Each structure stands twice: as C-alpha cells, then as structure tokens.
Amino acid sequence: MRELVFLLEEPSAKAMLESLLPRFLHPAIVVRLIPFRGKQDLQKQLVRKIRGYINPGARFIVIQDQDNFPDCRVLKAQLLELCRQTGRAPDCLVRIACKELEAYYLADLLAVEQALDVSGLAAKQGTEKFRTPDRLGSPSRELKTLTRDRYEKVAGSRKLGLHLDLGNERSASFKNLIRGIRRLQTELLGNAT
C-alpha cells in the first residue's frame, strides 16, 4: 500500500493537512494523520510509532513547530536522530515550521482573507512583516491580531488548507514542506507495482 504517514505536533496541523492534501495528492496514496499533544509527546512517541508501523512501504513526514528553539537546524537534527533510531530513516522526512504553523498562513494573506472572510488582508502582503513571516516571533499571535480574533487554531487551519497557494514561496518552511510531500509522492508512485 502506498501510504504517507504524518506525525504531527498538534491537531491544528492535522486540520490544515486534511483540507490541503486532497488538493494535490494522487488518490492512490493513502494518508494517515497522527496528531500528538505537543512536541514533547511527539518526540517521546516518535520512535515507537515508526518502528511499530506495519506497512513496510510507508513514508513518514514529521512536522514540528520551531517555537522558541534557537536553531531550527539543530531541532531538525534531533528529530532526524529519532528517525534513525527507528531503523527506517530513509523512509522519514522531517519538516520544521519556522516559527509556527501560522507562518504558513501569514505568507498567504489572500488565503487568510478568503478562508476567514476578513477583507483587506491581501493588500498587507507586501509589507516587510509579511514578506518573510518565518522570521516573526509569534505568528499565531500576529494572525489572531490581524484577523481580529477570527482565527481559531483547528477550525481556522482546516479552512485555510482549502485556500493556501501551493506555489507560495514567502514561507521557506511551507515551500519545503510542499516540495518534500511532492517528492515522497513521486517516490511512492514510482515504486508502485
């Protein structure tokens, strides 16, 4: 079975992917979304979940927010080490949302405007703050303020997944996530018998 298994820090990432992935994934690929209760829970259970996964052809994508971790490369290396401990490291892809998942949304203010029905947001995309939202200290707080509290983590993420521009490159972490998913999809479809 061609399967992509997402190991996610939180339910909001699951909600976003539930609406985003059907927009571009081939229907022959089975998707499993496994949210955890925060980064400690994800890191604690990661090795066991991947090691015990029955489908030997599955590919795994681990997604975690950087939050206040000082260096996203060190964080990614730590998660890759956990993947190595599973014995299935070649089947794993780690992606860090810099600083938070909400940076993906701030990189596409037109999508936010459409999904949350807040007019005038797309016009702000050219401002310095929103040209590279991965650098913001607290994208979630910024998004709440910008939308006048219309953004709610899970419901808002689900709506935004329907509108995010898959080719958007203002968030490097979003761009890398989409490229990584597409690469694994190609691998899975290429390995089909």
Image (cartoon, rainbow, N blue to C red):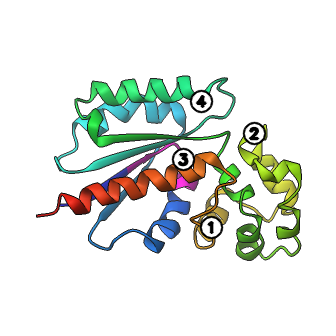
Q: In the rendered structure, which amino acid carries the disc numbered 3?
A: Glu
Q: Magenta span covers which residues?
A: 6-13
Q: How many marks?
A: 4
Q: Earlier in the sequence, mark 2 or mark 3?
A: 3
Q: Are marks 3 and 4 in contact (CB under 8 Å)?
A: no
- Residue identifier under label 2: 135
- Residue identifier under label 1: 164
Q: Name the residue rendered at 67%, 23% in the picture.
A: 70
Q: In the rendered structure, which amino acid carries the disc numbered 4?
A: Cys
**67 relative to 128 in the view: left or right:** left
Alpha carbon distance from label 2 to label 3: 21 Å
Is 11 within the magenta?
Answer: yes
Q: In the rendered structure, which amino acid carries the disc numbered 1?
A: Leu
> As rendered, which of 45 and 130 lies closer to the eye?
130
Q: Residues within 10 Å of mark 3 (few under 14, many from 20)?
A: many
Q: Position of residue 181 (x, y in %)?
A: 42, 55
On screen, residue 33 above or below 9: below
- Residue identifier under label 4: 72
Which of the two marks, 1 or 3, is nearer to us in this view? 1
Q: Secondary structure at mark 4?
A: helix
